Amino acid sequence: MDYAAVGPWRELARLWAGDGFRFRFNLRPGRTGWMEKGQVGAAVLEERQRWLGGAGPQAFFWGPGAEVVWTELTPMLGAGLRELVWETGLPEEQARRVAMDWAPDFLLLHRSGPGEPLRWVGGAVCAASGWDPTEKLGKTVMEIHAPVPGLNEGLGARVDRFLDGLKPGEIWERENWGLAASGELNLHPALGRARASEVGRLDDLWFRLEEQAFVALPGGDGVLFLIHVRTWPLVEVLELTGDRDAFGRMLASMSPEIREYKGLGAARCWT
């Protein structure tokens, strides 16, 4: 997996194709390499190590059930990451050490028993997209998504069915996107970054892509959720895709609640 910096690609236009904004699941079989250390830019690792080392808001999380999920996960890691596990002590220390050399953020999801929902029990979040992970630890997937206007109503049941049906070892992936005032990876609210609504022109915004992957673990009660963030100036993305008008229509079709949630301002519409 190439986690290093690359430019945007033309196919990103599929994320806003159609007659207006809507939440899309758009799952597909995962690429190989998600579980490998992969190619990573030095600047990304330096930033991850800084956050995980205690600078800024909390970036590492460990709660009841995390050790069970981590123990099932470690045999699935690529050789480069397993070496980091072998040279470290307790599972919590292993997970933090791996997070410092693995580009994606990861969430460990655990089901406490048959019929119980999956809950977020641990992981590393160094590139939060405007949310505070400390508020989400221990919550179910539906509870985590509750602040997103219309998401649970539109996709919640489908997401739950998908997670319940994942087979051990399977990897599925999808993409999510957002807009930001800068190309910074970590937009944790505690850092006080400017919101997209504070930017005057559409061409001054940054496009924020989340590459996401879901991995079912062998025991059947754990799921690994990976998030790798890339950012580019929005103008570069729109020039490459040639879909500026479609993108503008999609923004204009957002409800005020969605625009406010995404940091665009309740009545914001750029031209």
Image (spheres, grey):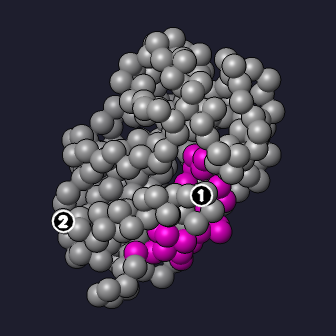
Disc with the residue nearer the chain's start (2 vs 1): 1
Three-letter code, disc 1: Val
Amino acid marked by disc 2: Lys
Would you call the spot at circle 2 few (<14 residues within 10 Å), some (14-19), or many (20 or more)? some
At a point 70% along the width and 46% down the height, the residue shown is: 256
- Seen in the image, is 207 located left or right of residue 205? left
User: In terms of image quadrants, where is residue 34?
Assistant: top left
Foreground tag (2 vs 1): 1
Residue found 51% across the figure and 11% down from its top:
239
Tell me whether the residue at label 2 lies in contact with that at label 1, contact meaning CB atoms closer than 8 angstroms: no
Residue 138 included in the magenta stretch of the image: yes
- Please state the horizontal and vertical placement of residue 85, each as a whole percent of the image: 35, 60
Relative to 96, 198 lies left or right: right
Residue occupying image coordinates x 67% and y 25%: 205
Q: Which residues are magenta?
A: 118-143
Give the distance between the C-alpha atoms of the residues marked 2 and 1, in whole angstroms: 28 Å
Foreground residue among 114 and 222: 114
Q: Is residue 184 magenta?
A: no
Q: What residue would you read off at disc 2?
A: 167
Among the 4 quarters of the image, the one containing residue 112:
bottom left
Compared with 246, 162 (above or below) is below
Is residue 118 depicted above or below 268 in this figure?
Answer: below
> Circle 1 sits on which residue?
148
Residue 18, given in percent of the width and then of the height, sits at 43, 32
Picture quadrant where residue 262 is located: top right
